[in-house]
Image: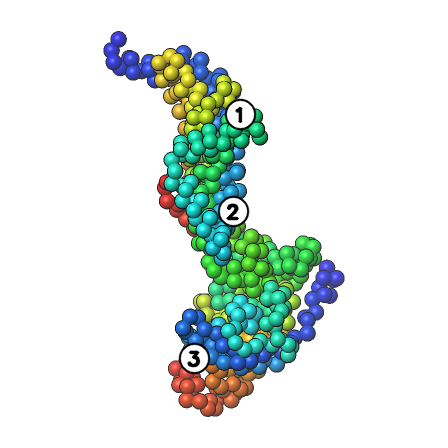
Amino acid sequence: MDILTTLWQTFFDVDAMRSALPDLLTVGLPNTLLLALSSAVVGTVLGMLLAVAGLSGSRWLRWPARVYTDIFRGLPAAVTILLIGVGLSPLGLQVWGPNPYPLGILALSLIASAYIGEIFRSGIQSVEAGQLEAARALGFSRPAGMRLVVIPQGVRRVLPALVNQLIALIKESSLVYFLGLVASQRDLFRIGQDQAANTGNESALLLAGLFYLVITIPLTHAVNAIDRRLREGRRADAGQAVEDDLPLPITQEAH
Amino acid sequence: MTAPVAELSAPAAVSVATRDVHLSFGAHQVLRGVDLDVAAGTATCVIGPSGSGKSTLLRTVNRLLEPDRGDILLDGRSVLGEDADALRQRVGMVFQHFNLFPHKTVLANVTLGLRKLRGMPSEQAREVALHHLGQVGLRDKADVRPGRLSGGQQQRVAIARALAMQPQVMLFDEATSALDPELVKGVLATMADLATSGMTMLVVTHEMGFAREVADRVSFMDAGRIVESGPPVQVFEAPESPRLQRFLSQVL
């Protein structure tokens, strides 16, 4: 057998893929989506709290938000997941029983919230000061003006960066395998990796990788579409002028 | 339809006065003791060079800026002890750059305060908003977003947004300075209508023609003080202070 055939079979063994497919579809995919979406929701809520705290007039809110963000953006995801997932496992055992998911989701959420907080903060800060001033001139308090006028505009500007963060979460969710998963808890990565380790053939892992791409590539294009729409404005009915009320999105630095 | 509009009878206009108002930003003294009187139902235009403190003065009246010293009187009563948010519901303001909320429709811009601050049901708020949009000639633009409107239309929506709150006083901060020349006229006409209707107005402006024709009084401000005040004819035809004479020779 020449080397090319060996390589081909290592990555594209149809039988290996076929045997992994049911588990990937019925176990891995739902678990990956559950991990990613739950932490996206929790991370977004925490991120908004962080952003608001970070923009607060009080240093007692600003400082903790700053420190939190620095820590969870600065640590490798694997370290955070192990520290939370293993370190807090006695606590988790009491609250949730022997399921590593809650702590895994918590760890992923804490990491995501640090990034999402910065995304929201940059969006909110980009809204012109005149917007809050106009809201206040109508008689709104500062918190009400932020909530009704400033934050909705700020969030809108950073939607593309937010979707990027969701993509990062989908990929990072594979790291919960550190916490030890029973068969029914395995995510896409773990199922592919288990079979690859058992058989010495990478095809199942490659198929798992394809699953990730099937989720993330459309999302990437969704980002581009949102981005374009924010830039060019929403198309109204044919023949009507282009709506140009949408502010330009802010490009978020990669991380 | 008739019920809400019946409630639209303008609230009694009140007088506005500032007494020895001082305000500094750091070491920079922007207001150095400003005394100004706007009688109820009249319009006063404040003119003067850039940086003279006109816009800052305007913002102390509705307490977007708090004076370091001095007093602000509405209807003869100090407003400095009052809740600032409540005060601003009684004092409408129009900005140089309109500051409409771009993520909301024209209608939603006008109804926001009515619904969220006055607790008005949305159907009633809609009627009130449409009435005021009609007043500025933009009833048919209720459902579009501000970005689709010209600058002049946006500014008229901003005026409707302020009027919907039934203010006792209206403040205008260089409301036409950011407009293309051909759009200025429509906004000034709206403001002139409002002055005719008996609204108390304090108008910071560079439009000398408007000040001359519409204002009951004109105050010239320079370096944080009111230098000269009087009826437009007096201020424009017979200015007393050399600084006002110099200013007018530059702008007229």
- Are the numbered discs 1 and 3 placed on the same chain, yes or no? no
List the single residue furthest toward the front.
Answer: A90
User: Which callout, 2 or 3, points to the residue nearer the camera?
Assistant: 2
Q: Is residue B250 above or below residue B112?
A: below
N-terminal of the two: label 1 or label 2? 2
Judging from the image, mark 3 belongs to the subunit labelled: B
Asked whether the residues under the numbered discs 2 and 3 touch, taking CB atoms below 8 Å apart as contact, a structural biologist would say: no
Say which mark, if any, is on residue A49: 2
Q: Is residue B154 visible?
A: no
Mark 2, secondary structure of its residue = helix
Position of A253 with respect to B102 (left or right) is: left
* Residue B209 image point, x, y percent: 49, 79
> Relative to B177, is A128 above or below?
above
Q: Quadrant of residue B181?
A: bottom left
Three-letter code for the amino acid on which mark 1 is drawn: Asn
State the separation of the CA atoms marked 1 and 2: 28 Å
At horizontal 56% and vertical 70% (from top left) the residue drawn is B62
